[in-house]
Image (cartoon, helix red, strand yellow):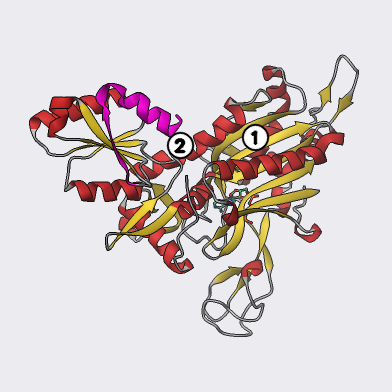
Amino acid sequence: MAKPTSDLPASDLMEKITNLAKRRGFVFQSAEIYGGFRSAYDFGPTGVLMLRNVKQAWWRNMVQLRDDIVGLDASILAPPAVWKASGHLESFSDPLVDCKACGLRHREDDLPDLNTCPACGKSGELTDAREFNLMFKTHAGPVAEEGAAVYLRPETAQGMFVNFALVMGAARKKPPFGIAQIGKSFRNEITPGNFIFRTREFEQMEMEYFVPPSQSSQWHSYWCEERLSWYQDLGIPSDLIRLRAHEADELSHYSSQTSDVEFLYPWGWGELEGIANRGDYDLTAHSQHSGHKLEYFDQASGDRYVPHVIEPAAGATRAMLAFLLAAYDEEDVRGETRTVLRLNPHLAPFQAAILPLSRKEALAHCSQEIAKTLRPYLMIDYDETQSIGRRYRRQDELGTPFCVTIDFETLEDKCVTIRERDTMDQQRVPIDTLLENLRNQLAI
Ligand code: ATP
């Protein structure tokens, strides 16, 4: 349903999205009344609906529609032993450079020129790079001593590895099978920014797919194609999204093969999701460190092996930004600019809005009754404020696929008007068939 982002200059588009996000209740700067907390955002009444829809679309695709993937919800806090085995304590870091002139810190790999500070412009003031660990550390219990140290997870993946044997046994699965998880992750990013693209607290949607070692390459290709299609099926046009294989010198310490799903953000191509072939790195490391065997034993054939892992790792909040950017459009309607989010109906905060033409008691009553019958099946907004034209514009900015208008004739002919977001076409339909009509058109 979505079409390519309108031909707005890139910087304008980002500003328009952030303004719309605030105005319409999608995303607020965290702690705004205290001056704002730059590295975190709060999802407002419409944003929370959209973010849930993004996660639900992923979960449906990964878990509900498949026989070979099960879910998990692991804890956010984990002891140092987990992060020692995973390699995060030692190497989950970014090279950090300080500017001696202005005091600002930068990620070395973000600097266009290793000699000049991008903030103050001074040359020769940047320090040598030093490694900065991105994990948030805290203490469990009342004593802030080293023995009580815990870390907030910087990715959800380790939960799947440490629970591998328990999940495989409980779910009666054998490779190839996957464990999927959605949840918050935390990274003390040196340079958070670009709205919800890079924050210190964010949400991930990760799946670890355990396969016989000889099949890892073919499953890696399979998941690259699957994941690219998922974004395209939800409305990201093919000229805004691509797969890019990592060069050998870009690969993480655990990966033998990684491809990123990249999105064309207003500032250029950037990562939306990483799909890594992690080999047996994680299960072997956790076996060695914990002393528990993490392997698969096939009783029928006597085969015993440590499965290899293919990991599609996506960001829910980053995906939401990509869906918003791709859906944003402006068009000229009779001399006025109409702003519309051409969101896939499965992602839009509301599937339909109920708009009584007037606040008169009889219309309000009838409209409320209609809303009540639709609510168990669809997310409905109800709006009786302002003129009908302004209410349509508001729903367009929220990406609501259908507006249902109730007018005085409705009381006579028991029909309502459905207005479609993208074409603005209107259709008169009987109240009796409204739900069926909407569900057919929404494919929900
Ligand atoms: P980047 O190179 O952008 O920092 P990464 O390669 O470190 O990302 P991964 O560790 O592969 O990211 O994490 C998987 C996904 O989680 C990313 O593709 C992204 O969608 C999301 N993600 C990672 N870090 C952040 C962050 N700080 N804020 C929002 N989303 C994030």
Real-space Cα separation, disc 2 to disc 1, in angstroms? 29 Å
The kind of residue tagged 2 is: His
Q: Is residue 171 rendered to the left or right of residue 55?
A: right
Relative to 43, say whether 199 is above or below: below
In the current view of this chain or complex, which residue is farthest to the right? Answer: 302
Q: Which residue is mark 2?
A: 346
Q: Amino acid at mark 1?
A: Gly
Residue found at x 52% / y 42%: 234
Image spot of residue 335 (x, y percent): 27, 63
Is residue 124 visible in this depiction of the protein?
A: yes
Q: Which residue is at the far top?
A: 300
Quadrant for the C terminus in the image: top left
Decide which of tag 2 and tag 1 comes sooner along the chain.
Answer: 1
Residue at disc 1, secondary structure: helix
Q: Name the foreground residue: 142 vs 79.
A: 79
Percent coordinates x, y for residue 214 in the rendering: 87, 35
Residue 79 appears in view: no
Mark 2, Cα crowd under 10 Å, few <14 / some 14-19 / many 20+, is some
Q: Is residue 432 magenta?
A: yes
Q: Which mark is residue 159?
A: 1
> Where does residue 341 sit, x and y in percent of width and height?
40, 50
Secondary structure of residue under mark 2: loop
The residue positioned 81% from the left and 27% from the top of the image is 295
Extent of the magenta region: 424-444
Tell me: 290 left or right of 438: right
